[in-house]
Structure formats: structure tokens, C-alpha cells
Amino acid sequence: MASPLILVPLLFISIRSSINKTSNMFTSMLYFDYLGLNEYEASIATAIVIGLSSLFIIVGGIISDKYRPRTSIIISSIGVFIGATALVFISDFGDLISFSTFYFILNASYFIGTPATSAMLAERVSPEKRGKIFGALFSLGQVLSVGTPVLFGHINDTYGIIMAFTFILSLAVIALIIGVYIYLSDKKLDISGSN
């Protein structure tokens, strides 16, 4: 029987997807507007950061296999929080290296948690029910992330780019809280299972 705790990783996935979509949406614009790159250079810079950070899916898989998915989720949550916080405080976006570094941290941390959340769902569900759960993962789990780029754009147009990144930071804080909750809940399950 599936644990109700499955809903928590789904919410975690949705919030992290929201962070990823809203930050990716404006990256080329920031490179273009704030760093003076032309459209081609901005696209290349964005592609390099996202492409290299996607390799951290492998890192997340190794961490999940060696230390359990919950450890990978905590690392992912903390990394996203650090990256989002740093982007808020780089207010002038004038330094290509610093901006790219913290944007890389945010994206790499997102990808670290990708195999962990899938592994966690698989751990909690019997094989004959995994199709439904992973169907939910790629549908219900993404619902929140559908509207956040629009909200992010509205905040950017109305209040400015710093407020828009503050919105990403608030999502990162929620993801961090849920990540800690998942970690502690898993630890309780381990303790109760060993008794």
C-alpha cells in the first residue's frame, strides 16, 4: 500500500520544477540586458550553464544509491536555496562569472534531486502501482510549475527583477523546508522499522 508521504515528494518536485522554470525563463534576458551579451552569446551562455549542470543527475544518482534518496534531497534543497539567495543579492548582475556560478549552483542542485525523488517514490510503492505514481509525478507533480513562470513575469514587470528573484528565493525556502521534512520523516520510518 502506498504511503500518504508520497504526496510530499510530489509537492517537492512541483516546487523545484517551478524554481527551475522561472529561473531558466529569464536567464537569457539577464545575460542579454544586464551583462551586455548579444542574443547569440546569451543563448550560448545559458545553454552551457544548463548543459553542464544537467550532468549532476549522475551525481544525484550516485548519492541516492550510496546514502539513500533523502540525503540527495537535502543536498539538492540546500544547494537550490544557496543559489537562489546568491542571485537575489547579486543585484546589478554585472559579473558574468558570479552570476553564472550561482545560476549553475541552482541548476546543478535541481538536477541532483531528480533521481532522488524518483527513487523515493519507487521505494514507497509496490511494482504494480508504480506506473500510476510516476504518471502522477509527471502530471500532478508539475501542476504548480505551470503557472509560476507567468507569475514570475508579472512580478518582474510590476516590481522589478530583484522582486522576481526574491520570489524564486521564497520557493527555495519552501523546498528546503519540505526537503528537511522528507529527511526527518524517512529517518523516523528507518527507526521504527529497525525496532
Image (cartoon, rainbow, N blue to C red):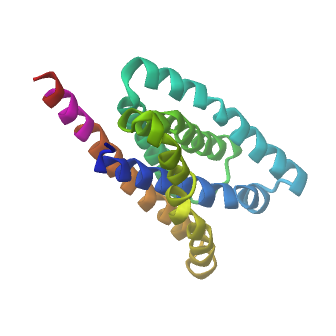
Q: Residue 101: which quarter of the image? A: top right
Say above or below: 108 vs 23: above
Q: Nearer the viewer, residue 13 or 54?
A: 13
In the picture, which quadrant includes the N terminus? Answer: top left
Q: Residue drawn 37% across and 56% down?
A: 174
In the image, residue 187 lies in the stretch drawn in magenta: yes
Is residue 157 visible in the rendered structure shown here?
Answer: yes
Check the image and name the residue furthest to the bottom: 158
Q: Residue drawn 33% across and 50% down?
A: 178
* x then y, percent, for residue 168: 50, 60
Left/right placement of residue 132 relative to residue 194 reads right
Is most of the magenta stretch helix, strand or loop? helix
* x then y, percent, for residue 50: 69, 42
* x then y, percent, for residue 13: 48, 50
Residues in magenta, as a range: 185-191
In the picture, which quadrant includes the C terminus? Answer: top left
Q: Residue drawn 50% across and 49% down?
A: 132
Q: Nearer the viewer, residue 152 or 194?
A: 194
Is residue 90 visible in the rendered structure shown here?
Answer: no
Check the image and name the residue furthest to the front: 128
